[in-house]
């Protein structure tokens, strides 16, 4: 373990789960160093994905905090709420929030991501317009919607559909517009996407796909296709962009060029989550993550990664080290009762299993499971996620059994012993 | 910490452990009451079979619990004993943990309902009921 002095000053910018992961890891190694968290939002860390569940009435404000009350005090963390960091000097090792100055020995940038709002004619004049990323967005939407409200959502990705789900029981009408030809374009193929779309259409949600807003007019949106959609409240959820400005300002590398010539934005970090600037670390949505399914880095805006990267950063910041983490896209969630879990990459040979109303599709390449899509009823799918992550050879694996009901026996008794038996543990 | 380990050479596949698990988690005093509302196994333990071989699969209460680290609500936590516990009032049933547990040890509780998982019978003095009631000692509760 690298030596860390007992009075190390840790400063963390951002108060999402990446920040929580870092705090928990730092305190495992270092009980005495000072930890200061600078938070733009005015709340202790809450489960960001819960904002749709809150609107839907499936959780309450007091159940949304990510850690129990007293977490910050118990970990001796100074939490500065409503205080966005606006400047870093990596030479004198200081961070500023307005006039307040915070000196650091190790800095973590965990600033997350922000919604993208595409420039559209008339947008500025729309009175009730929101994005869907923060608790405040949900609290505002709660105020401005009732049983008469017609909502227009731009974006049929995970966030857009989660916004639709959250608002569904509260409002009169929901219309979703997306440029892509299908819903959940990033995590579904055509057929699976079609299942979700028809399910939601049957619930009364209206979709305009392969379409976009030409301009916002008084009380309605004019689409490129010529259609007009009346609305009272607009929610833009077309995607997010990593918050890299502060990192960029101190010279961190904040993008990677891809083979296609299109850059991926996000702070570039090593396996220890350190940026290209010494003693400055980054974790979560603001970074590029190593995706084992593409063997390269890319933006991965999912909470498990954010926590684990924060944890890795905290471990190294406090002088520890750990095994390299393998990340991959994993998404789970329900849409008005229809549950979906997806993981990995969708290349290779698809195998499809349908039973009852459920749909399971697996992608296999070079005798390895690469990805899957599960809709409806499923069980124990983490066994599959683990196969993808480990890039396990399917030689000797009972694939037929695995795709019907994921189980450990299908992986062979040696594997079972290694994970469940005493000698393996 | 003590964990539940499987000795599959002794497992009869009787699935009593699955029923005792449901009962234990129900908080009911009497065994049959636990099933009155239609509760069915599995919950925290499940028996697998391959041909003549059976074995029970139970949460590892992992040193690196991916379920806890991926949970979107903070509903999963490690208790003082070391067990990975679920706060049913916080869980929103998103199933991220089901997508992450490498051994398939988390069971859906249904739409918008909390998930089910092994709590090591924390409410029963950490005396796992599956182990106490296995007629053939095919699961044991022991230190590593
Ligand atoms: C509606 C919605 C649903 C989602 N659902 C899921 C899901 O089901 N599963 C899943 O895995 N992921 C989901 N996600 C994504 C998940 O929430 C993110 O991946 C995760 O929150 C990233 O954590 P983070 O700590 O990196 O960043 P964030 O949670 O974004 O936290 C960063 C924090 O830093 C603050 N900050 C930014 N700049 C500064 C500054 N200069 N100074 C101080 N503070 C600053 C921000 O205000 C924010 O509070 C969802 C996201 C949304 C919006
Ligand atoms: S539920 Fe799975 S991931 Fe979580 S502690 Fe148990 S075995 Fe480990
Ligand atoms: S289902 Fe519950 S415990 Fe599992 S990740 Fe979602 S909120 Fe957490």
Image (spheres, coloured by chain):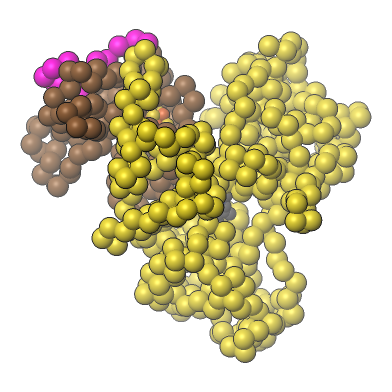
Chain colours: A yellow, B brown
Is residue B136 in the magenta section?
A: yes
Q: Where residue A233 sits: x, y (%)? A: 57, 74
For residue A101, above or below residue A138 = above
Residue A203 shown left or right of residue A325 in the figure: left
- Would residue A410 be visible to someone looking at this image? yes
Q: Whole-percent x and y of residue A368?
A: 48, 41
- Measuring 29% from the left and 28% from the top, which residue is drawn there? B57
Picture quarter with the N terminus of chain A:
top right
User: Does A173 sit above or below residue B144?
Assistant: below
Count the labels in the image. 0
The answer to whether residue B2 is above or below residue B62 is above
Which of the two residues, A58 or A200, is positioned nearer the viewer here? A200
Q: Whole-percent x and y of residue B52?
A: 17, 28
Q: Depth check: give the residue in front, A144 or A112.
A: A112
Which quarter of the picture shows residue A227?
bottom right
Residue A413 lies within the magenta run: no
Residue A122 vs A40, above or below: the answer is below
Residue in view at x 24 percent, y 17 percent: B7
Q: Quadrant of the C terminus of chain A?
A: top left
On the picture, is A179 further left or further right than B97?
right
Whether residue B85 is visible:
no
Question: Residue A341's spot in the image, x, y percent?
Answer: 43, 51
As rendered, which of A186 and B37 lies closer to the eye? A186
Span colored in magenta: B129-144
- The residue that appears at 38% across and 56% down in the rendered structure is A352
């Amino acid at each position: 373990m690298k030596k860390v002095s007992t009075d190390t000053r840790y400063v963390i910018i951002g108060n999402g789960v990446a920040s929580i992961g870092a705090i928990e890891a730092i305190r495992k190694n270092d009980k005495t160093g000072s930890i200061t968290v600078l938070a733009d939002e005015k709340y202790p860390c809450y489960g960001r994905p819960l904002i749709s569940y809150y609107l839907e009435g499936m959780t309450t404000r007091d159940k949304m905090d990510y850690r129990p009350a007293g977490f910050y005090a118990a970990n001796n963390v100074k939490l500065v709420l409503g205080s966005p960091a606006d400047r870093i000097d990596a030479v004198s090792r200081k961070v500023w929030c307005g006039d307040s100055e915070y000196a650091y020995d190790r800095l973590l940038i965990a600033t997350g991501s922000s919604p993208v709002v595409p420039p559209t004619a008339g947008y500025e004049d729309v009175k009730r317009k929101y994005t869907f990323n923060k608790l405040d967005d949900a609290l505002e939407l709660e105020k401005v919607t009732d049983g008469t409200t017609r909502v227009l959502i731009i974006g049929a990705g995970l966030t857009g559909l989660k916004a639709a789900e959250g608002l569904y029981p509260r409002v009169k009408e929901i219309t979703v517009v997306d440029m892509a030809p299908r819903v959940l374009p990033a995590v579904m193929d055509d057929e699976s996407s079609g299942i979700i779309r028809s399910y939601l259409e049957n619930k009364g949600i209206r979709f305009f796909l392969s379409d976009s807003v030409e301009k916002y007019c008084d009380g309605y949106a004019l689409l490129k296709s010529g259609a007009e959609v009346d609305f009272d409240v607009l929610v833009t959820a077309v995607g997010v962009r990593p918050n890299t400005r502060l990192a960029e300002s101190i010279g961190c590398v904040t993008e990677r060029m891809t083979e296609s010539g299109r850059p991926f934005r996000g702070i570039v970090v090593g396996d220890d989550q350190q940026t290209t600037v010494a003693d400055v670390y980054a974790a979560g949505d603001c970074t590029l993550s190593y995706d084992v399914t593409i063997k390269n880095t890319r933006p991965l805006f999912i909470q498990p990664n954010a926590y684990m990267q924060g944890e890795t950063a905290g471990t190294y910041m406090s002088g520890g080290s750990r095994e390299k983490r393998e990340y991959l896209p994993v998404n789970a969630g329900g849409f008005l009762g229809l549950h979906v879990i997806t993981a990995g990459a969708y290349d290779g040979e698809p195998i499809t299993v349908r039973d009852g109303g459920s749909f399971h599709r697996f992608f296999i390449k070079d005798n390895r499971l690469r990805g899957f899509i599960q809709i409806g009823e499923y069980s124990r799918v983490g066994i599959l996620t683990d196969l993808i992550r480990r890039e396990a050879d399917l030689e000797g694996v009972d694939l037929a059994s695995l795709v019907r009901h994921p189980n450990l026996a299908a992986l062979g008794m040696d594997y079972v012993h290694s994970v469940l038996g005493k000698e393996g543990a | 910490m003590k964990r539940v380990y499987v000795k599959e050479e002794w497992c009869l596949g009787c699935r009593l452990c699955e029923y005792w698990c449901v009962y234990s988690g129900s908080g009911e005093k009497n065994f049959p009451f636990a099933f009155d509302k239609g509760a069915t196994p599995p919950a925290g333990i499940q028996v697998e079979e391959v041909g003549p071989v059976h074995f029970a699969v139970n949460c590892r209460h992992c040193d690196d619990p991916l379920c806890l680290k991926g949970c979107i609500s903070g509903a999963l936590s490690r208790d003082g004993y070391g067990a990975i516990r679920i706060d049913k009032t916080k869980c929103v049933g998103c199933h991220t943990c089901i997508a992450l547990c490498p051994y398939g040890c988390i069971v859906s509780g249904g739409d918008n309902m909390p998930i089910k998982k092994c709590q090591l019978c924390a409410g029963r003095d950490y005396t796992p009921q599956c182990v106490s009631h296995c007629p053939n000692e095919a699961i044991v509760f022991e230190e590593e």
